[in-house]
Image (cartoon, grey):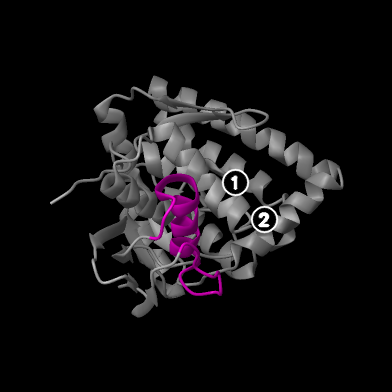
Amino acid sequence: MYAYATIIPRDDGKIVLNSLDKNERFEFEKTDFLEIDGHFELAKGIYNRIVKDFSKKPLSFELTTFVDAPPGSGLGTSSTLVVAILGAFAEWLKLPLGEYDLAHLAYEIERIDLNMAGGKQDQYAATFGGVNFMEFFKGDKVIVNPLRIKSIYLNELAYNLILYNTATSRLSSKIIENQSKNVLKKNEVSIEATQKLKQQAIMMKEAILRGNLNQIGELLDFGWQNKKLLAKDITNPFIDDIYKTAIDNGASGGKISGAGGGGFIFFYCPNNSRIKVIKALNKFGGKANRYEFTTQGLTTWTI
């Protein structure tokens, strides 16, 4: 699933914002600042930062966006769209932004300028693409380590993974705020769970690189059991029922994507159990999707 952004320069002094997936369109006179009013917040926040830091003057253009995944899916759609729009501006204005620069700028716009709750992994994942082991340090230091994984391992992973859309969405910011509060209050259960999630990332990296794919499901389940301890709204009886049904029909583990509370869940289904799992999940009214890996992150071009 991808996010797309197209910019067409205009010479009539207008700014036009189109969202094809939301079927929304807004038109403004060009200005050096677009008010953040609940409509096209991401695009406006990006434009304001572009004018402030780079163009130093108002721009006239038409921006059209489309996102394959629905909002509230937990697939990092907002951050991916920010990266796509930033990439379009960088391509149009020939901005000297490398991958790290662009990912960090996307993070600042979303988390600082627009004050949207969340982490910074989504911006880097969308920018770099591929399978990476990402390290986040104090301050703004981030290191993205691309993993050289054998194609046979990736093929087997893609075959055994199911991306299940629960057909429910959630407000991720509220869940993330609750997670943050638990850590700030030094909630021992939440802090210990956070440390175990860090351990899970290291164990997952080693399992994939070594080809120990039989461990993937167990590691996903290990992460899911600890993720649920971060905040109370991460799961609910509906999600628990979906998870149990998948496990009962052959999945060896899984986890909800993003903050939790709804959206997509992915399951690891070894030993040709994926079809049985998909059929068992049909009763919940969601949809199972193929899991695919991509080797590329942000891609831009000019016609």
The image quadrant of residue 275 is: bottom left
| Residue where numbered disc 2 is placed | 176
Can residue 266 be seen?
no
The image quadrant of residue 170 is: bottom right
Figure check: 12 above or below 134: below
| Residue where numbered disc 1 is placed | 119
| Amino acid type for the residue under numbered disc 2 | Ile
Does the CB distance between marks 2 and 1 fall below 8 Å?
A: yes
Residue 194's disc number: none
Q: Residue at x 87, y 47 (%)?
A: 185
Q: Residue at x 37, y 63 (%)?
A: 69
Q: Nearer the viewer, residue 285 or 183?
A: 183
> At which x and y percent is residue 157?
34, 38
| Amino acid type for the residue under numbered disc 1 | Gly
Q: Residue at x 42, y 75 (%)?
A: 285
Looking at marks 2 and 1 on the same chain, the residue that comes earlier in the sequence is marked by 1
Can residue 47 be seen?
yes
Circle 2 sits in a helix, a strand or a loop, which is it?
Answer: helix
First to last magenta residue range: 32-58
Q: Tell whether 206 sits left or right of 180.
A: left
The image quadrant of residue 194 is: top right
